[in-house]
Structures are given as structure tokens and as C-alpha cells.
Amino acid sequence: MIAKPKGTYDLYGEDAKKVAYINDVLAAICEKYNYEFIRTPVFEATEVFHRSVGDASDIVRKETYDFEDRGGRELTLRPEGTAGVVRSYIENKMYGRDLQPVKLYYNEMMYRYERPQQGRMREFNQFGVEVLGCDDPFIDAEVISLAYNIFKLLGINNIRVNINSLGDRESRDNYREALVKHFSKDIDKMCEDCQERLKKNPLRILDCKVDKDLEIMKNAPKTLDYLNEESAQRFQKLQEYLDLMDITYEVNPNIVRGLDYYNHTVFEIEMLNEEFGAQNVLSAGGRYNGLVENLQGPETPGIGFAMGFERVLLALEAEGVNVPINNSIDVFVGYVNDEEKETALYLVQDLRLNGFICETEYLGRSLKSQFKTADKLQSKYVIILNSDDIKNFEVKVRDNKTKEEENVKINDLVDYLDMNM
Ligand code: HAM
């Protein structure tokens, strides 16, 4: 047997229905917030991710699926959605649109060569939004509210919104300097990765899982102490906006995020359920002013977040949410001989086009076993075809709950079902 690649999974059965439900909730909320759907290629020029996610990030250093195509092009399976969306924004000149800012959402598979565990896969499904062309913390608050309200709508309540600010470039540079000074003292006592990070991306040291309990980590400088006046005011404004929307949050200075492109607002929504496991960040994002310029576009501010479906499925489970999945059908059309079969073929098409969820027999089984199938499908009605009725342009309709039967003219069938359903 050929098995699926490590870190991937097949989506089917009950989980597939749950994902379809989550997709419906996401599409509906994006419509209300007036975000527009975008799909970008599953692979991009490798450079797109090096320039955006950052050469020094763990993702680019250790986790991307890079390959050369037959034409010798350097390509990478997307590890995240922001870089591709920004590439598309620039290439399609969305900055020139009449309607600004440009508010986009996507829902796609992503690829990271990570060590798989519960909630961490090598191929995973991210929903995300990106807003380009607005620098006002008003939009930061809207993006956080969208991320938060998705969980409210899904019935996942045991969550916490953590926010932090990395400040503008000046604040970030000052903070970076303070971190280098702080960690340089004892860097030889830290792990190899942290020694590397000190040179390339000291902020990432704060994310280290190996050294997290060291004293030097606990008393490391905090981003918020290094915000300049403008950055601090902006962060204050964001909190006022979140308060106005009744979104409870915690300021958590430890959130620095693993991707290089962030500045100002960063946030994560974490699952609080204690049994949830290590991968408890359900969605995360932040502001990335400067990224569009980095990818050779015009100066444009941006902010967004992404949410992992695999973790949301686990969260629904952990919270015991009863996902409203429709496991029943409207009509089962049963028949026995070939003449009836032709009528069945026509009828199911007609009923389906009229909006009914409709099933029929495909394997030539007896009427008795067709009735069993109709019961298993929880069909509300069973139509039982027979040649005599068909000659009279009629069918027998059985209410599958009361088992009462009635003959109905084929021409009146849609109205009859509509009235009784
Ligand atoms: P990220 O924090 O790398 O951010 O990923 C966002 C979310 O994707 C995580 O919180 C998690 O739910 C899910 N996720 C990440 N890696 C995996 C994995 N290996 N398996 C399962 N789920 C995973 C980004 O990707 C940014 N692009 C978010 C963003 C958008 N920032 C601004 N705009």
C-alpha cells in the first residue's frame, strides 16, 4: 500500500462536512465585512518568500519546499499566504483601484517542512485576510474583530486575544539593539539556534522553545518599553477601538511572531482549553508596513492574519461544539424496472434543479433494500415509482416519518414537496 506523505492527511467523511461548514461561515462573515476572495498560485518564485517572510526566519531557513522546475526556475510551495497575495497586489496594480483600501481573503493549502504533531502539519489549510492601503489602527481593530468573531460564530468561546506592538522601524531597531545587548552577555549558554538568531534575527530568540525557561529569557527587554511616541499612541488607539467593540484582549509583550515582515500591531488568538496541546494558537497576524516596497511595489501599508483549519477542527472538538451538519436528504426515488429507472433519472434531475437534496438507486437492489437506504439517509420523503402510476403521469409519495402515502401528479410534485417540507 502506498501511504500518504508524512505530515499530510486526507479530508473526508465527518471532518469534510465540518470543513464545508467552516467554509460557509467564513465566506458569510467575509461578505459582511466586504472582503473579496483571492486565489494565488500554490507555488511562487522562491524569491517572493525570501524577500518577505525573511531569510533569517525559521520558515525560510528550515521549512520551505523548494524545487527547480524543468525550465530551471527556482520555485517554492507557499508556506503562508501573505507574500503571494502581496505579489499579486503589486503585479495586478490593485494599488491603482478606485476603491481603497483593498480588502482580500483567501482559503488555501500551505506547505511547511515542520515536525508533524497534533495541530501542526506539513500540508495545512489556512484561511487568511490581508488589507492593503490603510495605515489607521481603525483597520487593525477591524481585522482583529474579524478574526475574533469567526470563533464566536463557530461557538469556540474559550479563547484569548493577545496583542502587542513591535512599533515602527525606529522602535524595532532600538528594541533589537537592546535585545542584542541583553542576550550577548550569556549567548554561549543558549542553544545553537539562538546563537545564530542573535546575529540574524534577535527577536526570534524570544520564541525559542529550548531556552524558554532560562532566567535571561524571563528578564529580557519588552517591546513596549522601546516604542517611540507615535508607535505608543497608535497602540493606545488600537486598544481604545477594541474596547469600543467589546473585544476582550490581553497585552502580551512576549508576542513577537516568527515572520520578519511585522511591525506595529501583532496579535494571536489562543485556545485556553488546557487539554488542547502545544499548538494552541488558532490564528495570528499583524501589520506589515514596508512589505509591499520590499517586493518592489509602491509604498503601501498592510495588515492581515491567518487561521489554521486543522486547529479549528480540534478546537470545535475540544469545546464540544455541535456543528450543524445536515446528514439528511429530502427525497429518495425508488424504482425496480428499466422503464421506472428512466423516470427516476428524469425525476431526480428535475427535483435537484428545483433545490431538493435527492438520492436514488444505482446498484439495482430490491425495493426493500432501497427503503433501508432511504432510512439510513434519513430521507424525508420516498418516491416509489411503478409502471401503472407512470402511465397516469403520477408517482407515489411516502412521508418517511408517518409512512403515509399519497399519489401525486408528476407536474405537481415540486409544489407538493415544497408545501410539505
Ligand atoms: P503563522 O503564524 O505562521 O502566520 O500562521 C497562522 C496560523 O496558521 C497559525 O496560527 C496556525 O493556526 C496555522 N498554522 C501555521 N503553521 C501550521 C502548521 N504547520 N500546521 C497547521 N496549522 C498551521 C502566517 O502564516 C501569516 N501569513 C499570517 C498573516 C497574514 N500575517 C499577516 N497576514
Image (cartoon, rainbow, N blue to C red):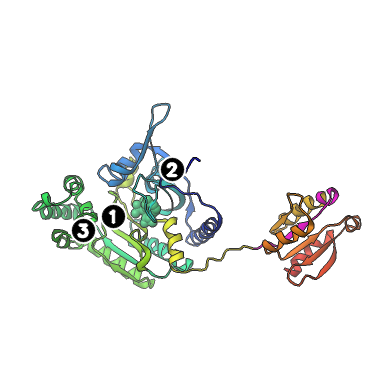
Q: Secondary structure at mark 3?
A: loop
Q: Look at 38% across and 48% down and name the residue there.
A: 82
Type of amino acid at the residue the image marks with label 3? Lys
Q: Is residue 288 rendered to the left or right of residue 22?
A: left
Q: Secondary structure at mark 2?
A: loop
Q: Secondary structure at mark 1?
A: loop
Mark 2 or 3: in front is 2
Q: Which mark is residue 5?
A: 2
Name the one closer to the observer, 249 or 277.
277
Q: Which residue is mark 1?
A: 257
Type of amino acid at the residue the image marks with label 2? Pro
Q: Look at 11% across and 55% down and name the residue there.
A: 182
Type of amino acid at the residue the image marks with label 1? Arg
Q: Which mark is residue 95?
A: none
| Residue 133 seen in the figure | no
Highlighted range, magenta:
328-341
